[in-house]
Amino acid sequence: MATALMWSDTAITWWSNIIEFALRVNKSATTGVLEHRPTGDADLHAVVWGTCALLLVCAVQAMFVRRTLVLLFAWTVFVELAQPWFTQLRTRQATDLIGNCVGVLIVLVVAEIIAKVRARR
């Protein structure tokens, strides 16, 4: 699903329409937030790929967690680099790639900590 979002022109159009609507309807509430938000959407990338990583951790056996997350990490790199082949509206962006990787890495670090705590018991 995350790959489809990253490679879809429609998802970007929907997101732009949602932001435009929010700015139009709730201008006083949304303007301050969007003005203080960093440029780009790396934070959204981190949330999307972090969620994917968390779902994968829940879906695989404990002994395959590290391998699964390393493969997902590699997949996020491929998805970001391949974007121009699948969509006209998105380009390769280093900040998006960093966001992708941060989302997966956070889940990987937490999974490793949990595994070490469980091993001590």
Image (tube, rainbow, N blue to C red):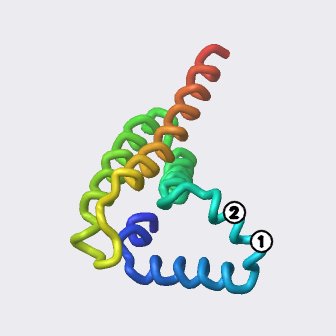
Q: Identify the residue at image location x=31%, y=51%.
A: 77
Q: Identify the residue at image location x=25%, y=69%.
A: 84
22 on left or right of 102? right
For the N terminus, the quadrant is: bottom left
Other residues around mark 2 within 10 Å, as few (<14) / some (14–19) / many (≥20): few
Whole-percent x, y for residue 48 in the image: 52, 58
For the residue marked with disc 1, what is the amino acid? Ala
Q: Which residue in the protein does label 1 denote?
A: 29
Query: Along the line of sight, which residue is nearer the eye, 62 or 69?
Result: 69
In terms of secondary structure, where does tag 1 sit? Answer: helix
Other residues around mark 1 within 10 Å, as few (<14) / some (14–19) / many (≥20): few
Distance, label 1 to label 2, CA atoms, is: 7 Å
Q: Would you say the residues marked 1 and 2 are in contact, meaning their CB atoms lie under 8 Å apart?
A: yes
48 on left or right of 31? left
60 versus 32 height, above or below: above
For the C terminus, the quadrant is: top right
Count of labels in the image:
2
49 versus 105 height, above or below: below
Q: Which residue in the protein does label 2 denote?
A: 33
Whole-percent x, y for residue 36 in the image: 64, 57
Q: Is residue 59 visible?
A: no
Q: Identify the residue at image location x=37%, y=45%.
A: 73
Q: Is residue 61 visible?
A: yes
58 versus 114 height, above or below: below
Query: Along the line of sight, which residue is nearer the eye, 52 or 64?
Result: 52
Furthest residue in direction top, as rendered:
120
Query: Along the line of sight, which residue is nearer the eye, 1 or 121?
Result: 1
For the residue marked with disc 2, what is the amino acid? Val
